[in-house]
């Protein structure tokens, strides 16, 4: 996981008037700002601010993990023979309600010998999400 800091600038203007000022044009030989009220001598206060970005690059799960998850989902949802379940399949599209999703998570925990936290379980919407989470938990467990 990488963390980058980006520095931005916030712009604020003090005004004696209760209205919000908008800047409509740049004019004159020295390119002075002109406010919506016609003021040319406008002062600004620049203050630095920081923004933190978190970038997470999760690895895709192994194909055999995805296949096992597909099999469990097919079994739990009693998916008909002709209907395919792939990594991109969404549980809701396959007809799963919230109880079905809980049962799928329980079956995954049993099959892989892991425990999935409730918050993580609620974020699972596709077979790929489930497989990626399983790989992440198994990796942490083996470390």
Image (cartoon, rainbow, N blue to C red):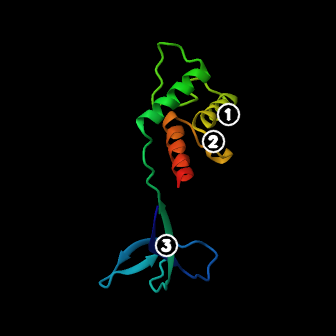
- Circles 2, 3 touching at the beta carbon (< 8 Å): no
In this rendered view, identify the residue nearer to me: 78 or 111.
111
Q: Is residue 84 above or below residue 51?
A: above
Q: Going 47% across and 13% down the picture, which residue do you hit?
A: 82
- Circles 1, 3 touching at the beta carbon (< 8 Å): no
Residue underneath mark 2? 121
Q: Going 54% across and 38% down the picture, which residue do you hit?
A: 130
In this rendered view, identify the residue nearer to me: 133 or 115.
115
Residue underneath mark 3? 36
Q: Is residue 59 above or below residue 79?
A: below
Label 1 or label 3, whichever comes before in sequence order: 3
Residue 35, image x, y percentages: 47, 76
Name the front one of labels 1 and 3. Answer: 1
Q: Going 54% across and 80% down the picture, which residue do you hit?
A: 13
Tag of residue 102 = 1
Q: Going 67% across and 30% down the picture, which residue do you hit?
A: 103
In this rendered view, identify the residue nearer to me: 13 or 116.
116
Left or right: residue 120 versus residue 53 is right
Q: How many residues crowd around disc 2 within 10 Å: few (fewer than 14), some, or many (20 or more)?
A: some
Residue 28, image x, y percentages: 33, 81
Q: Is residue 4 visible?
A: yes
Q: How many residues crowd around disc 1 within 10 Å: few (fewer than 14), some, or many (20 or more)?
A: some
Q: Write down the quadrant of residue 102 in the picture.
A: top right
- Circles 1, 2 touching at the beta carbon (< 8 Å): yes
Q: How many residues crowd around disc 3 within 10 Å: few (fewer than 14), some, or many (20 or more)?
A: few
Find numbered disc 3 in the image and state the secondary structure of the residue it sits on. Answer: loop
Name the front one of labels 2 and 3. Answer: 2
Identity of the residue furthest to the left in this view: 29
């Amino acid at each position: 996981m990488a963390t980058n800091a980006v520095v931005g600038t916030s712009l604020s203007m003090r005004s004696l008037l209760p209205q919000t000022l908008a800047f409509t044009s740049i004019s004159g030989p020295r390119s002075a700002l002109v406010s919506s009220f016609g003021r040319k001598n406008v002062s600004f206060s620049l203050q630095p601010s920081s923004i933190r970005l978190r970038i997470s690059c999760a690895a895709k799960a192994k194909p055999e993990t995805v296949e096992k998850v597909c099999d469990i989902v097919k079994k739990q949802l009693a998916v008909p023979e002709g209907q395919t379940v792939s990594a991109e399949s969404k549980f809701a599209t396959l007809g799963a309600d919230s109880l079905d999703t809980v049962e799928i998570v329980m079956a995954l925990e049993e099959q892989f010998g892991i425990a999935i936290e409730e918050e993580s379980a609620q974020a699972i919407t596709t077979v790929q999400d489930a497989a990626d989470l399983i790989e992440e938990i198994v990796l942490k467990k083996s470390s």
